Image (tube, grey):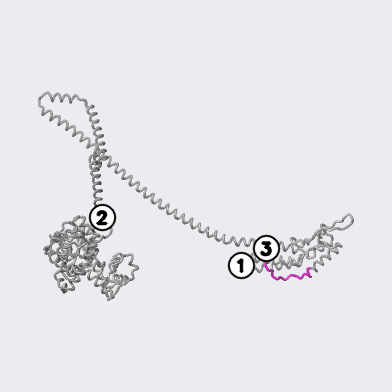
Amino acid sequence: MSTQKDIRLPPLSSFERLSSECQHNAEKRTGRQVAIGGPGSCRASTRVGCTSGYLSTWPAHVTSQVVQQGRRHTSGGEIRNHGCGDEFGGPVGKPRFLEQLESYLKKELQALDLQQPKVQERKLQAYREVFGCFIEDFKTYKPLLCAIKNEYEITLAYLRDQIRELEPLRARLVVVSEQCEKRILGLREEERVEIRALKQERQHRQKVIENMRETQSSLQTQVCCLQADLAAQYLMYREECDARKLLIANISSMSYGPDEEPEEEQEEVEIEDPVKEKLALKVCREDLTKAQVELNRLHAEYGDVVPRRDWETLDHTHKENLLKLETLQKDFDQMKAEYDTLLEVHKQVTTQRDSLQGELEGFKEASTPRPEWEQCADVLGGSERWADLSQGQSSQRRLEILLAELGGKNSEFFTGLGTSDDVPIYLRYEGQLKNHRLKKNAVVRILKEVWKEKVMEDGRRNESSNLPEFLRQHLERQYGEKAGEWAYSLVEGIRQHQKDDSVSLFNDILTGKVDESVYHGQTHLLSNLLKVLIHSDSTESGLLSVQDFRDNLQMAFPLKRAQDIDELVTTAQAELDNNGGSLPYQRLYTEDADGKHKDFLNLVKKQASTERHMYISQLRTQLGGKGEVTVADLRAAFKNIDPSLDATTLDWVLTMAFQIHQEELEQHTTQMDTELALQHLLAIDVTRAGPAPQQD
């Protein structure tokens, strides 16, 4: 229960005094004690012999009402009160205690502000305080009134708790209702959009249907016209057929002359019934149609069928081949086992021979002075080639190599280098191999075939194969058991014709000095130029004016300088013996008898190589003399000198520079020597993608 405020009520002595006065007046009127409302009402009723407690029934609902005292005389002459209570006569006023309680309650209620929150609880508190004072003053009814008050307080507390529990639910209900409203609005909006889209689609389909109907009507009109034309053509054909028959009959009659036989035949023809002729013609046409349908069916069903005789022949041949294959496989397995045994014995003998040969060479070197082998470099094409040939070889072997190099042109056979891992895969052959003495045109032809087949196979496999391995496979496919002879003959021909650009480039790629992308870059460069020239030749005459040729060169090579374009135009005019007229540009792509490009295409490739070296020089300058670089340094340098370079090409260039896989590019933090990285870049086809940035 809430704490009651202190209110000023009249003291109990005055209230008791008021009660005593009331009792005294009642005793005067009745001669007996009359019970009135107040704390001592129960005791008064007990003294007057009332059978039950009585509380004053002051008429609170009637103001100044006069109540007559009703008395009844009993048979014994005893005067009794009506009921158990007394009726007051004359005017009756409110008790002072009640007036004080009402005035206090009125004052508290007037002091409340109805605009403030929880005003009802404050009003209830005022009534609670008045009721508490009422309970405190009436001692006799205090337990019952306290119990009533407690029950009401418990009920109010329970209802307050219920309200407190339901408040979040009401808020949640409001939120859920708002969400549902929003969702309903969203669904309605989606339905509107969907309905609008369906309406538009319906209109579109109606238009399509109308267009199709119009098309159908136009096609129907065309069909009618075609039917009419067909009927006319058929009529003309019938008339022509009849005229032809008449003409044949006339010719027949004229050829026979006045003989009787034709007249008899004519009479027979005239006598024949035309209806029978029509029926016979109709039957013949139906038979012809059936025969044509049957013929078409037979063609469709048995067009790809192999005759049984051929199939039996092929089956017999297949079985014979299987038997031969099994026999050959057994022979091969036996020979392979014998070969493995001989190879093992050969290895042991070779090991012993090598050890004895080493001891012999040691004795020879100790007993004779070492010659100046460096002097042979000038004869064999430079110090690098001599170093490759003689590195790690004994003096005797060096002499043999020198003699073989000097007498290679006249040698009839090559000696195989063996099958060890240090020998290139395309030269791993043993024994004496015949020298085919290939000429330059044959060498160039073989190289073109190798490139053509390799490009096709790489495109089919979607990955680039190794050139040495592919060369060996190509020679084995082309020449079978003589692949070794052609491999050594081809290498000898390549060595003899190093001055040719295509042969030299193939040798550099084959030996690993240059990446294969350089060849593909040159091929793409020349093919792209030819495509631009052909595309600009709208008349397809194969001729372009000098100015159009210059413009196409500038279009194909947008990054070239003006002097380079002028040099190309001048070289093309000199090659074609042109003095300002139209240029037959297709003749620039012709080759000589040895398969060598002429001056114009050689100049295009030379300028591309020069531009690549200049590009690497700019990159070296951008690195600023660093001794070692990382992937991030080289990436930043490329972006500074060539901002137009795309990310894919840049990643490929970086992988080639650092000789790593693309998956390791992001985690690679090891530094590499700058010059080594630049040498790797010179060995690939790295070109400028866009114009150089402007320098302040």
Is residue 429 or residue 453 the one in the foreground?
A: 429
Position of 199 with respect to 559 (left or right) is right
Which numbered circle lies on residue 624? none
Viewer-nearest of labels 3 and 1? 3
Q: Amino acid at mark 2?
A: Ala
Q: Quadrant of the C terminus?
A: bottom left
User: What is the number of callouts on the image?
Assistant: 3
Whether residue 610 is visible, yes or no, is no
Position of 214 with respect to 55 (left or right) is left
Residue 214, above or below 540 = above
Sequence-wise, the earlier of marks 3 and 2 is 3
Residue at x-position 18% and y-position 25% = 270
What crowding class fits label 2: few (fewer than 14 Cα within 10 Å), some (14-19), or many (20 or more)?
Answer: few
Q: Position of residue 608 (x, y in %)?
A: 21, 67
Q: Position of residue 424 (x, y in %)?
A: 22, 63
Residue underneath mark 2: 337
* CB contact under 8 Å: marks 1 and 2: no
Sequence-wise, the earlier of marks 1 and 2 is 1
Dominant secondary structure (helix, strand or loop) of the stretch shown in magenta? loop
